[in-house]
Structures are given as structure tokens and as C-alpha cells.
Image (cartoon, rainbow, N blue to C red):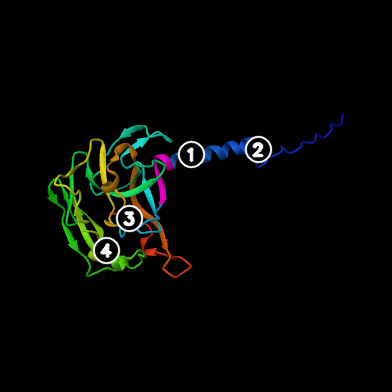
Amino acid sequence: MEEKEQKTTPKEQPGFFSYENLRSLFVLVLIILAIRWSVASPYHVPTPSMEPTIKVGDRLLAFKLAYNLKVPFTDFVIFEWGKVKRGDIIVFKYPKDTSLDYVKRVVGIAGDRIRLVDDVLYVNGEPQARTDHNSDRSILKDITAQKDLKLLFQEKLDGVLHWTMNSIPDMRGPGRGNWPGDASDYIVPEASVFTIGDNRDDSSDGRTWGEVPESYVKGKALFVIWSMYTEKGDTLPKMRFDRFFSWLK
């Protein structure tokens, strides 16, 4: 008896907007967002408050596992294995508007006494060494925010050598290099850190709005992923190739 040939029809492939594809896409997006929240995330820097350490146009990578592990999409800490240290550059929620992220340098931890006297930073009564670096201003070559009106220094904070800048005397008000204005030091509250921008006269920081709660700290800024800037009068941006993957300190 002759057997009839059975025809098989190919299995229909799901369309792009099928349930299976949309579910896979949703899971992928969720994983990416969880990594950005809890592990690492890039940040764009639009202001000069941390120049010349961090320049306008830098794209940073903040390592969010530097101090602890948080439940994704929350501020609940699962494990803590480190503490913010003096000299760290941190990304944190701006205390006056927690929808904004700021990046600054930590100059004081809980219990520290902070003071500026004639632009010299004092921590617990000890002056932090500061040296004039205006004989070599090459670090400022690709800064566009009034670099000719800035004085360049290097400061050593807890062994961390980093750049700072101050405006020239003619551009400063009386007593600008002294903070706070009275005779007492500023004492950093418990469970908090105190931050100041490296561009000391062009930074909105703890001297204006106070301490940063430790729970607001999102991570430590590790390095510049890539960077570009636009010189005054130009329309096309320029790349700072020498800053690609450069570590921050």
C-alpha cells in the first residue's frame, strides 16, 4: 500500500513585537538599569567646579560598588565594605534637590573640623600642604572658563596630591579665601561627609549648602571615559584624546 507523503509547514517565527521578544527586551533593559544603579554608571560634567581635575565635557565613570552594594532602584544598603575617605571624588545626590547629581571632592568625614585660612585648607587643625604651580600651567591648555583669571596650585590632602585653582585677587571679594567667617571651625556631622570643588572660587559646594549625608553618596568617580570641548569662537568640538581612560585623583 502506497504511503502518502505528509507535508510539514515551517514553524512561524514570532514577529519583532511578539510577546517573547518584548519580554526579552524588557529583561535586558532591566538588567542594564540595575547595573547602572548598583554597579557603575557614566556621568557628563557640564560645569567647571572641579577644574582642572575634571574638565567641562568630561564623561566620567562612577563605580557604585566602591563603598557598598545597594538594592537596585533603592538606597537600601545590603553590604558595606568601605567608607568614603578624604580626597575621594564622589558622585552624590545634591542635598538641596535630590533629583540632581553632583560630583565634588571630599575634604572632611564625620567629626572632622574644617576651615580655610587664606585659601589653605585646615583639617582638624592641620594645614594641608599647598604649592604654587603657575610656572607650569599646561594642565589648563584646554580649559575655556576664564583660565587666564585663575591661579593654579597642587594640594596634598591625606597624601592625595591633586589640583586646585583660585581666582586672581582682583576677581575676588574681601575674605573670600577664609571660611567659615567666624572664629570657629565647621564640624562635619555624624553619618556625613563634607565636599569642596577643586575650582575653589567657582564651586557651589559644602561651604554654601552644608554636608552630604552618607546615604546620598552614589559612588566614587574613577576615571574619564572620554572627553571633548569647544573652544571659544569654534563651532565644532575637539576631542581630548589624552584624557581618554585617565584615572582621577
Q: Which mark is in front, 4 or 2?
A: 4
Q: CA distance from mark 3 to mark 2?
A: 48 Å
| Residue 228 falls in image quadrant | bottom left
Q: Read off the residue under disc 3.
A: 49
Mark 4 or mark 1: name the one nearer the start of the chain: 1
- Tell me which residue sits at (35%, 44%) in the image: 94
| Residue 23 falls in image quadrant | top right
Q: Which mark is in front, 3 or 2?
A: 3
Q: Read off the residue under disc 2.
A: 18
For disc 4, the neighbor class at 10 Å (few under 14, some 14 to 19, many from 20) is few
Three-letter amino acid code at the position of disc 2: Ser
The percent coordinates of residue 218 (x first, y second) are 36, 42
Find residue 31 and name its label: 1
Three-letter amino acid code at the position of disc 3: Ser
Q: Read off the residue under disc 4.
A: 171
Three-letter amino acid code at the position of disc 1: Ile
Three-letter amino acid code at the position of disc 4: Met
Q: Secondary structure at mark 4?
A: helix
Q: Is residue 136 magenta?
A: no
Mark 3 or mark 2: name the one nearer the start of the chain: 2
Asked if disc 1 and disc 3 are in contact, CB closer than 8 Å, the reply is no
- Tell me which residue sits at (31%, 60%) in the image: 52
Would residue 208 appear left or right of 120 to someone viewing this image? right
- Give the magenta part as a residue range: 36-43
Mark 1 or mark 3: name the one nearer the start of the chain: 1
Q: CA distance from mark 1 to mark 3?
A: 33 Å
Q: Secondary structure at mark 1?
A: helix
The single residue placed furthest to the top in the displayed view is: 1
Asked if disc 1 and disc 2 are in contact, CB closer than 8 Å, the reply is no
